[in-house]
Image: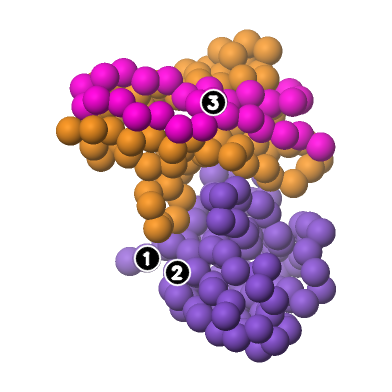
Chain colours: A purple, B orange
Amino acid sequence: DTAVSQTPKYLVTQMGNDKSIKCEQNLGHDTMYWYKQDSKKFLKIMFSYNNKELIINETVPNRFSPKSPDKAHLNLHINSLELGDSAVYFCASSLGPSNQPQHFGDGTRLSIL
Amino acid sequence: SQELEQSPQSLIVQEGKNLTINCTSSKTLYGLYWYKQKYGEGLIFLMMLQKGGEEKSHEKITAKLDEKKQQSSLHITASQPSHAGIYLCGADPYGQNFVFGPGTRLSVLP
């Protein structure tokens, strides 16, 4: 069973479109995250939710809006996609918000045409 | 804010050789994590270190956090092609957001 699953795995779309990436974890964790990994493989945190509450909101354009309908899900919606949004987006989860290892999904590769 | 540096940036070794990857923090580490990323895949958690001088091992991989808690090393003994990938250190800064190092790309030649 996949612990942290993201869909879709690949997303190719045109500039200006709106798209969503879904994430689900079946580990019973309280905390979930979204990361962006750029072309240089640098991994940077975007958002974190603990028990459905937003606890980390890095300097991310407000075109990116996370939504956590319950503890097991954290979705990422992106409005008006731009070329610079092309990257791999990773979802992760952990037991709690600190001092806990994070478990990662396989990533969603977003390409903007 | 806390920043992590890793060295080397990339490493190519012959199968069977030992190797070390270093992670240096700009501030005291309260929790240091090592992850491995295979090309095109997600990150796999390897080890977590919290106490100065702590050392942990998993199969042929050993990680250590120095006494001053500002540097960690990851050592692989008798490397195999299956060890190839990107190794990232991550830190759990007190009161700040989780950060990752830039990664070390390891290639193991058969």
Horizontally, residue A20 falls left or right of residue B85, namely right
Report which residue position mark 1 lands on.
A2
Give x and y (percent) for residue B107.
33, 36
Asked whether residue B27 is drawn in magenta, I would say yes
Q: Which residues are magenta?
A: B1-28
Q: Check disc 2: other Cα within 10 Å, few if <14, some if 14-19, many if 20+.
A: many
Q: Is residue B23 visible?
A: yes
**Residue at left offset 57%, top offset 50%:** A40
Report which residue position mark 3 lands on.
B7
* Vertical placement of residue B27 versus A4, above or below: above
Question: Dot 1: what SS?
Answer: loop
Give x and y (percent) for residue B47.
46, 34
Q: Is residue A32 visible?
A: no
Q: Which chain does the residue under circle 1 lie in?
A: A
* Vertical placement of residue B37 versus A72, above or below: above
Find residue A59 and report its image quarter: bottom right
Numbered label attached to residue A5: 2
Q: CA distance from mark 3 to mark 1?
A: 32 Å
Question: Dot 3: what SS?
Answer: strand
Please identify the quadrant where the C terminus of chain A is shown.
bottom right
**Residue at left offset 69%, top offset 76%:** A82
- The amino acid pointed to by label 3 is Ser
